[in-house]
Image (spheres, grey):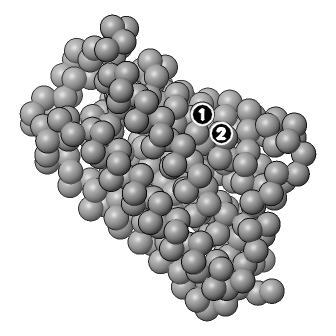
Amino acid sequence: MLSSAVARGFTLFLLIGLPLMAARNSRLEEHVEAIDAARPALYLSAALTLLLIAGLTAIVAAWETISPEQLGWTVGEPAVALGWGLAATAAGLGIAWLSGLIGRRAGLEESPLLRLLIPRSSNERRAFLVLAGIGAVCEEYIYRGFALHVLADWTGQPWGAAALTSVSFGLAHGYQRVNGILRSAALGMVLAVPILWTGSLFPAILAHFWINAAMSSPASRWLLADVHAEVNPAGEAADREDDSTRGDGT
């Protein structure tokens, strides 16, 4: 069944509206000290926002009688899904590493907001992993489930639809500045590949979670351009590493 005007309109709302929300979030860079003191609250706020948007997407899908199977809620062969998930994770981490390498050599700075969102303590890392799981499920459902399905049905071009959703996904990470937008767009395309090949969201969800989890680990110093530079109250990076890179585990 062809997608209706409602489904198409909501898809456009997602693909345009989420980047606009990200543009507003970039203003949070002006409140560095408050963010540094309230990381868990920001994790909770981000999780609730994603759940709300995913919930609205599910309501539209149900209204339009788009089945869960059409949106990728099927596993197929678990071993195949796991294999695709591992492959997408490896490709995504490779892209993140290359992006960080290019960023360092080109002198590109990650946004102060991104640096401050990286967890510092064990409790924060646990909270971040919960957010990573929620983000993986919700963002994959919104972008590579609903939006990709509707655009592919609308245009008849699945790969073109994957490219458009990946661009929007990158722009929705606009608070991460240019380097983060390009990195996220490339990751979005990588995550779309297993869905187009298998029809299942689960490989992308697994890969998305594992990539996000890596960003909260000491490995992030190799994956991001300057994420472990200390941020002073003016939102500028200093040349010291924070205590999460010194391995104190607190």
Q: Position of residue 39 (x, y in %)?
A: 27, 38
User: On the rendered structure, is 109 left or right of 90?
Assistant: left
Q: How many marks?
A: 2
Q: Evaluate whether residue 12 shows in this view.
A: no
Asked if 115 appears above or below 193 in the picture, the reply is above
| Secondary structure of the residue carrying numbered label 1 | helix
Residue beneath the point at 67% across and 75% down: 151
Of residues 6 and 191, the one drawn nearer to the viewer in this rendering = 6
Farthest-out residue, left: 233
User: On the rendered structure, is 24 left or right of 185?
Assistant: left
Farthest-out residue, bottom: 5
Q: Evaluate whether residue 203 shows in this view.
A: yes
- Please name the residue that numbered disc 1 is placed on: 210
Quadrant location of residue 34?
A: top left
Of residues 125 and 101, the one drawn nearer to the viewer in this rendering = 125
- Please rate how many residues cluster around mark 1, counting C-alpha atoms within 10 Å: few if below 14, some from 14 to 19, many from 20: many
Q: Amino acid at mark 1?
A: Trp
Residue beneath the point at 52% across and 31% down: 213
Q: Amino acid at mark 2?
A: Ala
Q: Position of residue 4 (x, y in %)?
A: 67, 90
Farthest-out residue, right: 77
Q: Position of residue 60 (x, y in %)?
A: 58, 80
Asked if 242 appears above or below 203 in the picture, the reply is above
CB-based contact (under 8 Å), mark 2 and mark 1: yes
Q: Quadrant of the C terminus?
A: top left
| Secondary structure of the residue carrying numbered label 2 | helix
- Please name the residue that numbered disc 2 is placed on: 207
- Please rate how many residues cluster around mark 2, counting C-alpha atoms within 10 Å: few if below 14, some from 14 to 19, many from 20: many
